[in-house]
């Protein structure tokens, strides 16, 4: 059975593992803090790859940033990581084939192959963490758009320039549905700049905190309704740390009441914390 | 060259014409007011088909309502037309093959084959009329979703249940970007329930009317930005009577400033008023 060395590259952490064609992790997972500079990141990649490339058939990257349709480079800029990182020539890192995909796309693919959306040809995954990632599977294929940048969940939740988004524009879904969005919603409702998303989550029995939580969860609901009307999907998958707290039964029931398309499911991701690495490896096996 | 008898079925008008494989209309276009009852609609179809079916290879329908993935029936209910209409057994209407597709999807396909999005694999069309229709072309194929209902432009423009949408939910793009949406925006800004969309369009030099127009056009802009971030398309095509009035250069320039995906075009539909019939015929030729 073929094996991939898979790396998950985020702004804070970098993970690596050997993954087989069943999507199983073989051996230990290596964990690193993401170095500050581009050269240090590149050196870390070279070190990891040099130690493992002889054991594997392909090197797979699940990375922050939009990835092109030839799966060998990053499009434009990415926040939260050394600014030269998008210029990295991934193919030069190894004599073995190198395959690159966006981390949220990779995780969506893992859910499609062996997780919550398995057996469902049409799914949209929303990764609710500090920000919001998106991955779209249509007709059993990862949807990338004309250049590979598709699946950015930056559609508007209001049009009065109320809340700035990390993307530079205003009032995107990410600015409301993320963990950061929950904190902002809490700040707006309470007037307290020091309130955290944990204050809300941990005190949901308190009516004031419940009101904040419900506002945040209903923003997620509204986003899901829009996506269901656009895509007529089999399911919307929610993943990420903030997906632990939402009421899936409520979201599925309320969304299905309001859509004009056909009934769909709202399900929790189940491919685990390393779904990015797993999905990138599984996609890499398909491409080589 | 093959020919289709194509019918465009709306809540107000029904058109029919013979169309060839080049998408050219052969002979006269027949025009009818849409009958009030289901049986009268069915009789009209039978009459039109009986007069032309010997001349053609296929009967094509571009119809209001979502159409299933086998292109032979309507999903769920459709507003504005006899309520039994969706139960119609289209295949029983002719001995020739019968092909059915949603009118907005058909029009988007006509633009893709011979109109404004020709040569572009990824496009989203918005038909801005009394309501808003949508048609999505991905990788040179009409995107239908799991059951055929995809492309409904009912994503939210705000989340505070401000304006009721025709779909029964609140604050959908259709409720703001349509002609009806422009009238509502004008009513809200002026407090005058009798103001019409024409009052706004025809007096755009007046600063008060310009403010209303700009609000409406910016709502369209916000919707386009969301769709561009989701799909990374080559272009967004605007069609329909209300598309006559928007500033395409402004929409394209401003949207491209705000997206996180890659540059795209905003273009005006050019396949004409009968693009629904033409697109349905062209799709029908592909299927038979």
Image (spheres, coloured by chain):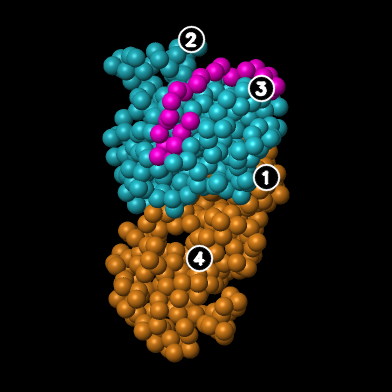
Chain colours: A cyan, B orange
Residue A26 is covered by the magenta coloring: yes
Question: Does the residue at mark 2 contact the one at mark 3 (Cβ under 8 Å)?
Answer: no
Which residue is disc 2 drawn over? A194
How crowded is the residue under tag 1: few (<14 C-alpha within 10 Å), some, or many (20+)?
some
Which residue is disc 1 drawn over? B263
SS of the residue under disc 3: helix
Q: Badge 3 sits on which subunit?
A: A
Give the CA separation, mark 2 to mark 3.
39 Å
Q: Are marks 4 and 3 on the same chain?
A: no
SS of the residue under disc 4: helix
How crowded is the residue under tag 2: few (<14 C-alpha within 10 Å), some, or many (20+)?
few
Residue at (36, 18) in percent of width and height: A201
Magenta stretch: give its range. A18-41
Q: Marks 2 and 3: which is nearer the front?
A: 3
Q: Is residue A9 above or below residue B81?
A: above
Q: Badge 4 sits on which subunit?
A: B
Q: Are marks 2 and 3 on the same chain?
A: yes
Which residue is disc 3 drawn over? A43
Give the CA separation, mark 4 to mark 3.
53 Å
Q: Badge 1 sits on which subunit?
A: B
């Amino acid at each position: 059975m073929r094996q991939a060395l898979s790396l998950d590259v985020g702004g804070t952490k970098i993970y690596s593992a050997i993954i087989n064609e069943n999507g199983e992790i073989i051996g230990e997972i290596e964990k690193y803090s993401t170095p500050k500079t581009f050269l240090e990141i590149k050196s870390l990649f070279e070190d990891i790859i040099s130690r493992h490339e002889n054991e594997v058939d392909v090197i797979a990257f699940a990375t922050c940033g939009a990835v092109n349709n030839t799966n060998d480079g990053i499009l434009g800029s990415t926040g939260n990581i050394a600014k030269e990182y998008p210029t990295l020539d991934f193919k030069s890192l190894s004599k073995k084939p190198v395959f690159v995909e966006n981390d949220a796309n990779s995780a969506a693919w893992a859910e499609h192959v062996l997780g919550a959306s398995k057996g469902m040809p049409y799914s949209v995954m929303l990764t609710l963490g500090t920000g919001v990632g998106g991955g779209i599977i249509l007709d059993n294929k990862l949807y990338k758009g004309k250049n590979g940048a598709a699946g950015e969940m930056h559609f508007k939740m209001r049009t009065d320039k109320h809340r700035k988004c990390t993307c530079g524009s205003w009032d995107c879904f990410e600015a409301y549905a993320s963990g950061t969005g929950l904190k902002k919603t809490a700040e707006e409702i309470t007037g307290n700049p020091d309130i955290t998303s944990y204050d809300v989550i941990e005190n949901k029995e308190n009516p004031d905190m419940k009101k904040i939580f419900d506002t945040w969860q209903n923003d997620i609901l509204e986003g899901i309704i829009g996506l269901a009307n656009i895509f007529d999907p089999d399911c919307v998958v929610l993943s990420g740390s903030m997906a632990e707290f939402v009421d899936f039964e409520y979201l599925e029931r309320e969304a299905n009441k309001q859509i004009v398309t056909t009934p769909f499911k709202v399900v929790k991701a189940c491919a685990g914390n390393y779904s990015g690495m797993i999905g990138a490896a599984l996609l890499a096996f398909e491409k080589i």
